Image (cartoon, grey):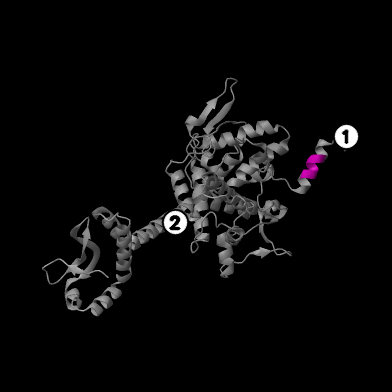
Amino acid sequence: MFGLQIRTTQTEGRTSLFTRIKIEGKSTWVDLRLIVDIEKWNKVKDSERKISNFLDGLGYSKKLYEIEVGMKDLRKRHSLTKESMETLIQNVVLSEVREQLKKDEDLEKDILERRRKDVKNFIKNYVDGIVKGEILNTKGKKYSKNSINSWRQFRRIFLECFKHQSFTWDELSQQHIHTYLNFLDKQGYMRETKNRHIGVFSTIITIAEKQRLHTNGIVRKWLSAPSAIDDEKKALIYLTKDELKHIYDLPLTGMKEKARDLFLIACYTALRYSDFSKIKRGCIGVTEKGTTVIRLIQQKTLGQVVIPIINEELEMLLKKYDYNVPSLSEQKINDNIKLVCEQVSKNVPSLCRKERTLLTKTERELLDKGKRVFEFDDEGYPIKPRWELVCCHTARRTAITNMYLSGKFSTRQIMSVSGHKKEETFLKYIRLSLDEKADDVASAAFDGLF
């Protein structure tokens, strides 16, 4: 081993080891780039054995050996210069540092790539982009308020489901899908709500695939929507003309009266809460032929609807409020219209008829805690009287179903009022029982089946 020295007059601190070698016929000090403690070096410098042990303890012996072998090889090839010696020393001394830096760099890249492909992280950022208006829909427009709410709700539920589990798109498996679907079931969501969340999940899987974050599109095959069963459909009722008449004629005051009036306006217009609650005098107009109409831009679809006021009850209700529909939250309408329908049911037995339904998440929790009792049929399905199933959206189904049953209007005409663009979606609002469907067939076949 060549001789080693330090070149400093200081007695403490740290410094580099040097060796003196002949380069191009001239004796030259070479900095070996190996750092030692000055005080410790001075204690061992006079003993080769102590120096050897000292260098072993620092892990320098192997490096010094590699430098010595490399230097001899350079000399043998007549390539020993200050520059080649400097390069040799850097390659030997800094090899571990460079290797560690490379490992750190690769690890950082892996972390960034995993973070980029992390499902939950992607969903968070994507929904944030929709909310901020940075991500547009397929038509190149900002998402509507209702669509944003759907994406937000999906994100909340998905993150709640997997709050203690992280996985990338490539790791997304059939088990994750089953966990998510089971989570939706346990929350007690209705079929349509589950279908909406499943649809959003399927969409975001496709988006991530298009962004080349994965080639795991097979998971969409496992992400199937629950099938529609008749028992669940029965939870979505409509009110008959006779039931509406009794509700209209019921003397009421205060909050119940206002909720009843708003509900009936919806029943006579087929509008959603987000639309009928915004009816003002400025929405009222007249066609060229003299038909009084309500003109609105639907909040959910941004499509325009023109609804003729051809129902006497609707006209009286609008006049009652000077064509400015009063303000009342959807929840207050839901709460109060149930009370109104319960009151009407005392004289209208059809509203007392019990229907199979599903319990909401809150109702399931109350049932599990023994804080509320529900009635179940012989097959274990929860059942409720029809009056208890009435809510704001019942009004839209009521309008569409009764228009259909009247036989006065074509599907196209009803859709022009409801604002539906797709017949498939529209038909879901026609809530006929099997008996009513049979009556419908019988009335069409006035002269026999064939």
Q: Nearer the viewer, residue 403 or 96?
A: 96
Q: Quadrant of the C terminus?
A: top right
Q: Is residue 390 visible?
A: no
Q: Nearer the viewer, residue 220 or 117?
A: 117
Q: Position of residue 22 (x, y in %)?
A: 21, 60
Q: Looking at the picture, which amino acid does disc 2 mark?
A: Asp
Whether 157 is among the magenta residues is no
**Mark 1 against mark 2, which lies toward the viewer?**
2
Q: Which residues are magenta?
A: 437-441
- On the image, numbered disc 1 is attached to which residue? 447
**Residue 112 against residue 147 in the figure, above or below:** below
Q: Position of residue 151 (x, y in %)?
A: 51, 48
Residue at figure coordinates x 19%, y 66% from the top left: 15
Q: Quadrant of the N terminus?
A: bottom left
- Left or right of 373? Residue 167 is left
Q: Are marks 1 and 2 in contact (CB under 8 Å)?
A: no
Q: Whole-Å distance between the Cαs marked 1 and 2?
A: 75 Å
**Residue 293 against residue 402 in the figure, above or below:** above
Residue at figure coordinates x 29%, y 75% from the top left: 57
**Residue 118 against residue 323 in the figure, above or below:** below
Q: Position of residue 303 (x, y in %)?
A: 55, 33
Secondary structure of the residue carrying numbered label 2 = helix
Q: Nearer the viewer, residue 4 or 244?
A: 4
- On the image, numbered disc 2 is attached to which residue? 110
